[in-house]
Amino acid sequence: MRIASLCPSNTELLDFIGLSDSIVGVDNYSDWPRTIEGLPRLGTDMDIDMDAVEALRPDLVVASLTVPGMEKNITGLKERNLPYIVLSPNSLADIGQNMLLVGEATDTLAQATAALSKYEGVLNQYGELSSLIPDRPSLYWEWWPKPVYTPGGGNWLTEISELAGARNVYADDARASVMTDWEDVLSRTPDYILLAWVGVQKHLVKPDSVKQRPNWFDLQAIRQGRVHIMEEPLYCRPSPRLLVGLRKLAYFLHPEIFPAFSLSEG
């Protein structure tokens, strides 16, 4: 089967199921697994070159609606009568269901079911360990600084936070993505500030940048240096690679509870 993937999270999910050898083209931002490096690039996930997709003669295109604006990709696929499915997960359970959807579409349901079992096994393991933690630090996840965007209660990072023995300070907001402001962040007094700017490489994000914001000294997290740059690919993409992010975060926050995990891995 010849599969084209139109966003990084889809490419990573295909790899987790064991379908990376079937991928014949990917969007410009897909960077995992490493085996895709030589594949044809189909444009940015918001501006896919449909001529390039059609030229690959795909048996299946795995599209996405995780970001507003991706709708035009779906329109393009329909206009060209290309076979496609759409993944649009917001939760960890959604990601699991997407594995089965891909398995059904590729006639690899047994393979996808095995991958789902592995995925759920890690989530269950960390759920059991996190239940041993009574006092949970609060986390402020920052997806974008200005305007401030942060994951809300309907997003996978709220679940990842809980499984890692912490809590998202915006868990009370049911939305998947919340636009707010720095003043509101200050009022929630997070114990940690975790910067994972969407689409920005880790080395380009500077933790001291938060000290240029109004009233930053009011936050103990900043005064005590609890501002951390997180790997965008491990936390901002709704794919099974969130398991790597979970393992890293959990061991970082509670090394006495969770399995050792090198922060240089993943």
Image (spheres, rainbow, N blue to C red):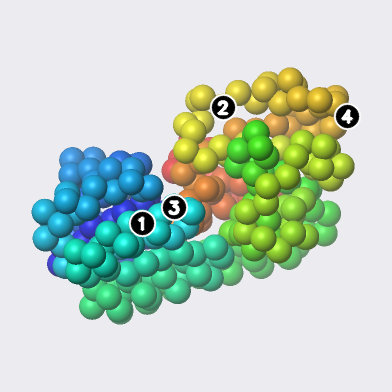
Q: Which of these two is toward me, 39 or 82?
A: 82
Label 3 secondary element:
loop
Instruction: Read off the residue under disc 2.
Output: 205
Which is closer to the viewer, label 3 or label 4? 3
Coordinates of residue 117 in the picture (x, y in percent) = 44, 73
What residue is shown with label 4? Answer: 218
Within 10 Å of disc 2 (Cα), the crowding (few <14, some 14-19, many 20+) is some
Decide if residue 218 is on the left or right side of residue 117: right
> Residue 27, how many percent across, how many down?
29, 47
Observer-side mark, 2 or 3, equals 3
**Image-quadrant location for residue 134:** bottom right
Q: Is residue 63 left or right of residue 234?
A: left
Q: Earlier in the sequence, mark 1 or mark 4?
A: 1
Image quarter hosting the N terminus: bottom left
Residue at 80% across, 33% down: 221
Query: On the image, numbered disc 3 is attached to which residue?
Result: 69
Disc 1 marks which residue?
A: 72
Disc 3, disc 1: CB below 8 Å? yes
